[in-house]
Image (cartoon, rainbow, N blue to C red):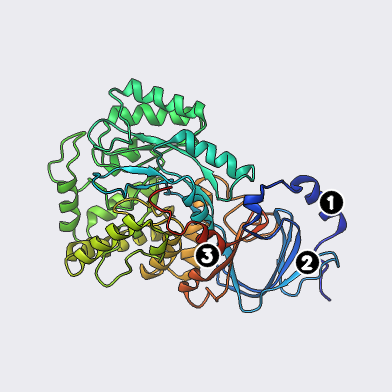
Amino acid sequence: MKRLCITIACIAVYASTCGQTAISEVTQSFVTYPMGHYVLQNLTLVDGTGNPPLYNQDILIHNDRIIEIGEDLIFPDSVTVIDMQGKSAIPGLVMLHEHLFYPKATPGTNFGLNQMSYSFPKLYLAGGVTTMRTAGSIMPQADININSAIQNGAIPGPKMDVTSPFLDREGLGIFETGAFRSSEQAEKMVNFYAEMGVTSFKVYNFITHADLKAIVNAAHKRKLKVTGHLCSITYREAADIGIDNLEHGFFVSSDFVKDKKSNDCDPFKQRKSLLELPVNSVEMSDLIAHLVEKKVALTSTINVFEPYTNREVVPGGGIDALYSTARDKVYKRWVSKQGRDSLDYELFNKSKIWEKAFYDAGGLLVAGTDPTYDGRIVAGYANMRLLELFVEMGFSIPEAVKICTLHGATYLEQSQSIGTLEPSKIADLIILNEDISENINAIRSIETVFKNGRGYNSKKLFEAARGLVGIR
């Protein structure tokens, strides 16, 4: 006999805790399924736990919560039934190295950054991202306001963990980022931005050991976390100081630079040292073991380093999302790199092995796309591509999904509410028109993205940003 999976009492509890929230007409225009009471029937699930896929599954949703998951569920007559035969579902993506800016595309300008307040929130949600960390901002007040607008229903987009501006000494040379001159000033910046409302901090290339200690101590006093794209400080040194997270896999590790001077950043020596390091070196194994012991998370942004030759112009697709000038700039660079990126391939292939070794050693590998560099990485599209690259790295499909969902939720300390498809969790999930359990490329067939129990039309969101990336 089939079990009745929900009672009137249970409905009453969830209705009282999660009731309807108002959204604007703009946001409503992208909604296919308003918040309500649904059963999604006959789905194939890759649930984010890393376990094998589940078949012929029903998901019962009430308002913003998953009530029950199982085969042939019994449900009240009041439930709206949606047949999903032939479709699959995964949890909403939880991505930890995202931005709301993009390289300038205007003619005659050197490298710089433009805020993407309009296009990127839509693109992230369209690509299945329901929760993200910005991992560095150029306009923190804008990011905070955008996050508030999303949560208030004024505009569509993912839930956001807003990170501080890049905390660094002088040397980067990008006008949109600032610099501090002392460790004391760095500590004041942590407190200033925390009071503004940021919830994470990002350190960068030219900081000193004293700077990092001051930043970590100030952030940890507020129970906030620090991540870093490092150069002047090695991964091992940062782990010993107490950093929570390291960005870009091992691509920016300076641990293997010979005769490295303390607090010195030489990106050319850093890259050369990784190219010369044997892929199965004891030194890398020891560093991985140290990071795992110190419980330092590692963010893979492997798509940023994807080579050009015989690969997509924009990884994951989406060249039509770019403003015409940006599109021309990206395409010309892609053409110029064809057959000329052998060293990129070498380091890319090494890094795939090292990141998987970190995961296999028990490290918390998390994911992000970093939509910056030369403009080839585009929000939303890149997030879908990242799952494909994890499978290319040797992860199983359930593992790839887990890294991009549960691991991110674990780092954000939100795994009790998001990151997997389980009863009582928030209804953040992606509906795919194809079976992702058989082919990771099905990630590109997103139909609907449920965030907080409300189903958004992915195609409409993508279309709304067409031609706008690079200008707004």
Q: Quadrant of the N terminus?
A: bottom right
User: Which residue is found at the position 83% from the left and 67% from the top?
Assistant: 4
Numbered disc in front, either 1 or 3: 1
Neighbour tally class for label 2: few under 14, some 14-19, many 20 plus, Cα within 10 Å: some
Name the foreground residue: 319 vs 308.
319
Q: Earlier in the sequence, mark 1 or mark 3?
A: 1
Q: Report the Cα–Cα distance between label 1 and label 3.
A: 32 Å
Q: Whole-percent x and y of residue 397?
A: 47, 70
Residue tagged 3? 50
Q: Whole-percent x and y of residue 414?
A: 58, 47
Residue 132 left/right relative to 37: left
**Residue type at mark 2?**
Thr
Residue tagged 2? 80
Q: Whole-percent x and y of residue 344?
A: 22, 61
Secondary structure category for the residue under label 1 = helix
Q: Residue furthest left?
A: 259
**Residue type at mark 3?**
Gly
